[in-house]
Image: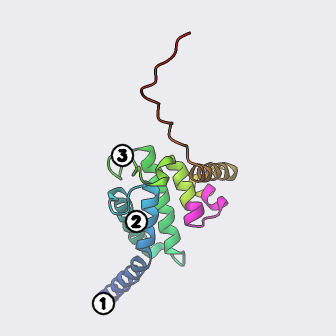
Amino acid sequence: MRDRQVSRGARRAREFEAFVAGAAGRLLHTATLLTAEAPAANPRARRLLTLTLAHTYAGWDRLLGEDPYDCARQYLATRFARATWHPYGALGHARRPDPQNPLAALAPRERLILVLRLYEGVAEEQAAALLGLPTERVRAICDRATATLLHPARPPAPRAMGRKAVSP
């Protein structure tokens, strides 16, 4: 009996290691996009990835034929969404996104929907179900976020210095 438990645990560990080897890089990139941090300095994204992998490992035996990447991505997205509602929650203190990152111009919910839809390829209906939003709302948020990225607001024009106002 003990030998069977040991071999089952070893098999579970090998399967999970293989999953992490194949999926951790993409999940970290997704988390970095969500947090809008710089790829070289992304502590919130790394914390989000660690929480996601720990949750996935804890439920590994209960997956029963489900796609582990899909389950991990769902947890990553919901954990990020919850952390944006509670900025001092599990991801640490709220930080401003990297100003060099184009996604920094988006609100967290816009980033979440845009990353799920465009980077991860999640269908509108699935994203809506995951986030508890109507499909039309997900479409509108995604369209607005895409427009913001494609047509960023221009910075205000510099004021001319040295000119005196002429009074009548």
Quarter of the figure with residue 23: bottom left
Decide: few, some or many residues near mark 2? Use Cα within 10 Å; few <14, some 14-19, many ≥20. some
Q: Quadrant of the N terminus?
A: bottom left
Drawn side of residue 8 relative to residue 132, left or right:
left
In the image, residue 3 sits, relative to residue 128, either above or below, namely: below
Q: CA distance from mark 3 to mark 2?
A: 22 Å
Lower sequence index among marks 1 and 2: 1
Quarter of the figure with residue 126: bottom right
Mark number, residue 3: 1
Residue at 29 percent across and 86 percent down: it is: 2
CB contact under 8 Å: marks 3 and 2: no
Amino acid bearing label 1: Asp
Q: Position of residue 82 (x, y in %)?
A: 45, 50
Residue matched to label 3: 94
Closer to the eye: label 3 or 2: 3
Q: Position of residue 25 (x, y in %)?
A: 41, 72
In the image, residue 55 sits, relative to residue 98, either above or below, namely: below
Residue at 49 percent across and 56 percent down: it is: 78
Residue matched to label 2: 55
Q: CA distance from mark 1 to mark 3?
A: 47 Å
Amino acid bearing label 2: His
